[in-house]
Image (cartoon, rainbow, N blue to C red):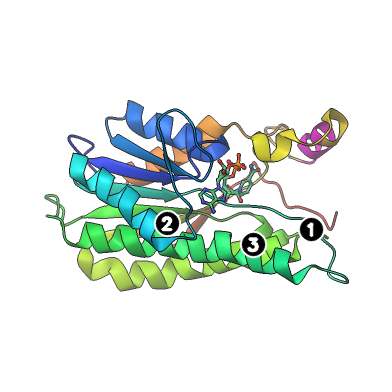
Amino acid sequence: MDAVEASALVTGAASGLGAATATRLERDGFTVVRLDRVAGVGIVAGDVTRPDEVRAAIETAAAAGPLRVAVACAGIAGVSRLVGHDLDLLRRTIEVNVFGTFTTLQAAAETMARQEPDLDGQRGVIILASSIAAYDGQIGQVAYSASKGAVAALVLPAARDLARAGIRVVGIAPGIFDTPLLAGLPEPARAALAATVPNPPRLGRPEEFAALVAAIVANPMLNGDTIRLDAALRMGPR
Ligand SMILES: NC(=O)c1ccc[n+]([C@@H]2O[C@H](COP(=O)([O-])OP(=O)(O)OC[C@H]3O[C@@H](n4cnc5c(N)ncnc54)[C@H](O)[C@@H]3O)[C@@H](O)[C@H]2O)c1
């Protein structure tokens, strides 16, 4: 996908994987609109659970050039065992991680579908952050795993649906990455987590997530699946 005069949207771009992705796409030549509910320099304030706010950010991007890339990184992770699970936490997790991701996918697809295709008949690519918790969720991750499993499951039907418009949909299921999501943990807990990763035996770097985004953007044959980016980690029950 050619970045020349093209735009990109990244949600959850104030922090972690989204921030690194926005920086990388900018370096690759895209004009990037960074959406986040947390205000910051260069951030368009908006909540992915508000379709009007997602659409406004996408319009801002498309005004700068054809929207060729949308990356849904906005997400939240609560922890609770099943018995006694707060249903409001379940609802909020599904609302942000599923509804918010769905809305971003839908709004980006609508805009991309109206644009001229490139020479290969392609109009854009939409990349969704799932998680390896979609496949090997740990104790305490029932709601989070359900939400990320939903994201992984919608990738193929969405890619099939959007195929005739020349729009690709790809998921990324990260393992454990060193972002503010994990920074809240005490150092021994972070070290213990890192020690569970086979090779390389460390937390992933946000730039490595961004590098996969760039590879997906560049390779039109990647479509309709969720790629694990986890250094061979298969999480245990706890
Ligand atoms: N860090 C990891 O190890 C890891 C592993 C697997 C999956 N993921 C997923 O990758 C994505 C990014 O994670 P991260 O580690 O960078 O997290 P992070 O907390 O550093 O960043 C997430 C960003 O999303 C924003 N956000 C949350 N709710 C929002 C909303 N309703 N509207 C707009 N913005 C909102 C937050 O303000 C934050 O800036 C998440 O979906 C997360 O579940 C992360």
Q: Amino acid at mark 3?
A: Thr
Q: Nearer the viewer, residue 202 or 165?
A: 165
As measured in the structure, the alpha-carbon distance from the residue carrying label 2 to the one carrying label 1 is 24 Å
The numbered mark, 2 or 3, whose residue comes first in the sequence reads: 3
Tell me where residue 53 appears, x and y as whole percent: 39, 54
Mark 1 against mark 3, which lies toward the viewer? 3
Residue bearing the label numbered 2: 170
Q: Amino acid at mark 1?
A: Gln
Magenta stretch containing residue 192, yes or no? yes
Residue bearing the label numbered 1: 138
Q: Main secondary structure of the magenta part?
A: helix
Residue drawn where x is 53% and y is 49% of the image: 74
Q: Amino acid at mark 2?
A: Val
Tell me where residue 101 appears, x and y as whole percent: 48, 60
Residue range corresponding to the magenta coloring? 190-196
The disc at residue 93 is: 3
How would you rate the neighbour count of disc 1 (Cα within 10 Å): few for under 14, some for 14-19, many for 20 or more?
some
